[in-house]
Image (tube, coloured by chain):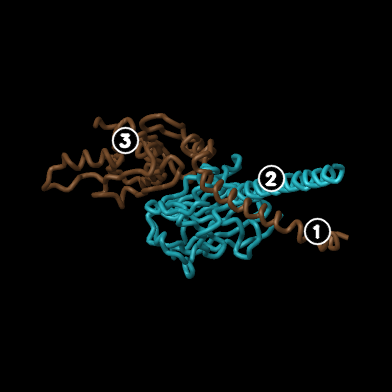
């Protein structure tokens, strides 16, 4: 009965079905592209939104709010807002603790990541700037000297920096906590 | 007069039918499209998976050139995957034979992971959430591993305590194992991890 109904009405329904499918495709693709802009409970928000500077996070709290986070690490997070000025992220500690840092834009996308070992001269020293701020900084650079820090222009004006200090022996959790806290995040005056 | 009236009713009716059909087609289209988005962003990253035995990694998810689906999933699930400069993360939800990891069974992890400054193994729910506290640790790192004189080791994942390297699995519930390699020699831009030997996951007895 269904088959005969389809045979009779199929040619009439087909254009509408094709239209619906076409629309479904457009809606699907545009909602995928818009998701990062409209997701309300993303990592940026779950990690504390607009707080400035480094927020130490007990690893239980980060692992509860973000999926698949290493329980053998201590975390700290810093939210940047380049409206307030360029942001300097650095760690002066050259401890033995393995410190891994990822730089995320507002939607959580990673635009740079490194570990203390891979970083410039074994020290993490990154400056986050808007393209305009970068021009200003470059104009005042001494000509015969390469910059000491790594300069990055994030895809979005706000975002967050996630620091993972792995728990290793000797020193264990305490040393990892100290290493995570030793990463400083400062807004610089323009 | 009466004939003209008859025609106009027919016309109106067919026009109404066309409106109704477009409305239905429109609703169905929007519904289908949103449903597809919901499904596509509910699970794991759909593209760019690299497999090695039961382990899967999504190296592109931690890079600036992640695909639109990965970006949508990162936003919706609040994921903060390991960046390519930090290391490489793998997840397994099945054993070597492809059977889902089950808290009722015990598993033995063995092998030689690729060279890395440090690696860690964590147990999660299949969605990546923390397991409720159990009788033992849910995570281990490479510097805690007890090794034989030859350097080989075994990690037993079981609900009850074992001698040696033991990770406490959730009795009776499904779970996932993650393997994070930090500062590793394995290139995250490698498109194929074919031939890369990670830890094997062999199922033992089940209760």
User: Foreground residue, A184 or B134?
Assistant: A184
Q: Is residue A172 visible?
A: no
- Rendered location of residue B30, percent (x, y): 65, 46
Q: Report the residue that reaches farthest toward the front.
A: B1
Q: Which quarter shows the N terminus of chain A? A: bottom right
Q: As displayed, is residue B202 above or below residue A163?
A: below
Per the rendering, the mark at residue A82 is none
Q: Is residue A174 left or right of residue B206?
A: left
The quadrant in which residue A91 appears is top left
User: Foreground residue, A86 or A90?
Assistant: A86
Residue for point 66% across, 54% down: A19
Q: As displayed, is residue B148 above or below residue A50?
A: below
Q: Secondary structure at mark 1?
A: helix
Residue for point 40% across, 51% down: B64
On what subunit does the disc labeled 1 rest? A
The residue to which callout 3 is attached is A184
- The tint of chain A in the picture is brown
- Rendered location of residue B49, percent (x, y): 52, 60
Q: Is residue B99 visible?
A: yes
The residue to which callout 1 is attached is A9
Q: Earlier in the sequence, mark 3 or mark 1?
A: 1
The quadrant in which residue A154 appears is top left
Q: Report the residue that reaches farthest toward the bottom.
A: B195
User: Foreground residue, A37 or A54?
Assistant: A37
Same subunit, labels 1 and 2: the answer reads no
Is the C-beta separation of discs 3 and 1 under 8 Å? no
Same subunit, labels 3 and 1: the answer reads yes
Alpha carbon separation for disc pair 3 and 1: 69 Å
């Amino acid at each position: 009965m269904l088959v005969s109904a389809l045979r009779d009405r199929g040619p009439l329904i087909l254009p509408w079905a094709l239209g619906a499918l076409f629309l479904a495709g457009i809606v699907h693709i545009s909602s995928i592209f818009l998701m990062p802009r409209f997701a309300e409970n993303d990592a940026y928000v779950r990690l504390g939104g607009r707080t400035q500077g480094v927020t130490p996070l007990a690893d239980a709290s980060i692992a509860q709010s973000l999926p698949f986070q290493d329980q053998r690490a201590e975390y700290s997070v810093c939210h940047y807002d380049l409206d307030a000025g360029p942001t300097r992220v650095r760690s002066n500690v050259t401890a033995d603790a393995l410190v891994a840092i990822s730089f995320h834009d507002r939607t959580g996308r990673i635009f740079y990541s490194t570990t203390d070992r891979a970083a410039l001269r074994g020290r993490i020293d990154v400056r986050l700037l808007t393209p305009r701020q970068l021009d200003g900084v470059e104009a005042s650079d001494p000509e015969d000297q390469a910059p000491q820090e790594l300069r990055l222009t994030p895809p979005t004006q706000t975002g967050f920096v996630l620091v993972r200090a792995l728990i290793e022996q000797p020193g264990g959790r305490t040393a990892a906590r100290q290493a995570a806290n030793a990463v400083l995040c400062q807004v610089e005056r323009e | 007069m009466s004939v003209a009236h008859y025609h106009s009713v027919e016309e109106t009716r067919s026009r109404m039918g066309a409106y109704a059909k477009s409305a239905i087609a429109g609703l169905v289209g929007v519904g289908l499209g949103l449903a597809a988005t919901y499904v596509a962003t509910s699970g794991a990253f759909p593209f760019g998976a690299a497999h090695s035995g039961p382990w899967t990694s999504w190296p592109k998810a931690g890079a600036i050139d992640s695909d639109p689906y990965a970006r949508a999933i990162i936003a919706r699930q609040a994921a903060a995957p390991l960046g390519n400069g930090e290391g490489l993360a793998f997840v397994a939800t099945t054993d070597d034979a492809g059977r889902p990891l089950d808290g009722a069974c015990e598993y033995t992890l063995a092998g030689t992971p690729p060279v890395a400054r440090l690696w860690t193994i964590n147990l999660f729910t299949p969605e990546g959430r923390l397991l409720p506290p159990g009788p033992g640790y849910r995570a281990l790192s490479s510097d805690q591993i007890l090794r034989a004189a030859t350097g080989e080791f075994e990690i037993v994942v079981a609900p009850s305590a074992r001698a040696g390297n033991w990770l406490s699995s959730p009795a009776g519930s499904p779970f996932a194992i993650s393997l994070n390699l930090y500062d590793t020699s394995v290139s995250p831009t490698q498109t194929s991890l074919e031939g890369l030997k990670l830890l094997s996951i062999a199922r033992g007895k089940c209760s």
